[in-house]
Image: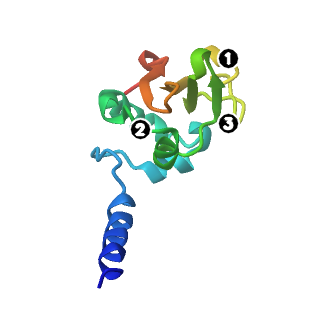
């Protein structure tokens, strides 16, 4: 009996620690976001306003949790004081077929997620958000 009790506690720990606690936002489909690499299909463009309006719900997640939500970033940068920045292309990405819109990188709409030295998301920002036709 002494061995069974710790085994139950261990099993309960694994069951409750493996739950998905992504922010539940109506209209935001994380799977669709992941498969729209570079924003080439236009799906990210439709959902980025939901992310921007609910940005507080995405703070304090670690990098692995953000990757499980949004997929692998198209670009990442190491910044001062061991900070990391993830970039997700939303529209006019140079990763898509070349058009006159994405020929100019200054028109690229990107979601930026900044992580602090403790690996927690601290800031979400959408570059060129005002250029979107929402």
Percent position (x, y) of residue 86? 57, 30
Q: Quick check: 104 above or below 71?
A: above
Left or right of 58 on screen, residue 36:
right
Instruction: Identify the residue at horizontal 59%, vertical 37% (top origin).
Output: 73
Secondary element under disc 2, as helix, strand or loop, is loop
Report the side of 105 relative to 31 (left or right). right
Select label 1 or label 2 by which is in front: 2
Tag 1 and tag 3, C-beta contact below 8 Å: no
**In the rendered image, is residue 79 in sight?**
yes
In space, the residues marked 2 and 3 are separated at their CA atoms by 29 Å
* Residue 129 horizontal/vertical position (percent): 44, 20
Image quadrant containing the C terminus: top left
Q: Distance between the residues labelled 1 and 2?
A: 32 Å
Mark 1 crowd level (few <14, some 14–19, many ≥20, 10 Å Cα): few
Q: In which quarter of the image is residue 77?
A: top right
Sequence order check, earlier mark of 1 and 3: 3
Q: Where the N terminus falls, by quadrant?
A: bottom left
- Can you identify the residue that label 3 sits on? 96
Residue designated by label 2: 61
Tell me the CA gap for discs 1 and 3.
12 Å
Residue 132 visible, this orientation: no
Residue at the image position 32 percent from the left and 46 percent from the top: 27
**Residue 17 place in picture, x, y as percent:** 37, 58
């Amino acid at each position: 009996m002494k061995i069974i009790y710790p085994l139950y506690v261990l099993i309960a720990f694994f069951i409750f620690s493996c739950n998905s606690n992504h922010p539940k936002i109506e209209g935001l489909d994380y799977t669709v976001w992941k498969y729209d690499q570079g924003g080439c299909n236009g799906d990210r463009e439709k959902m980025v306003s939901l992310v921007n309006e609910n940005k507080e719900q995405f703070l304090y997640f670690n990098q692995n949790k953000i990757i499980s939500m949004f997929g692998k970033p198209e670009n990442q940068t190491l910044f001062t004081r061991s900070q990391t920045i993830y970039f997700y292309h939303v529209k006019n990405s140079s990763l898509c077929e070349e058009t006159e819109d994405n020929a100019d990188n200054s028109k690229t709409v990107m979601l930026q997620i900044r992580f602090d030295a403790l690996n927690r998301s601290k800031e979400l920002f959408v570059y060129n958000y005002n250029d979107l036709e929402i």
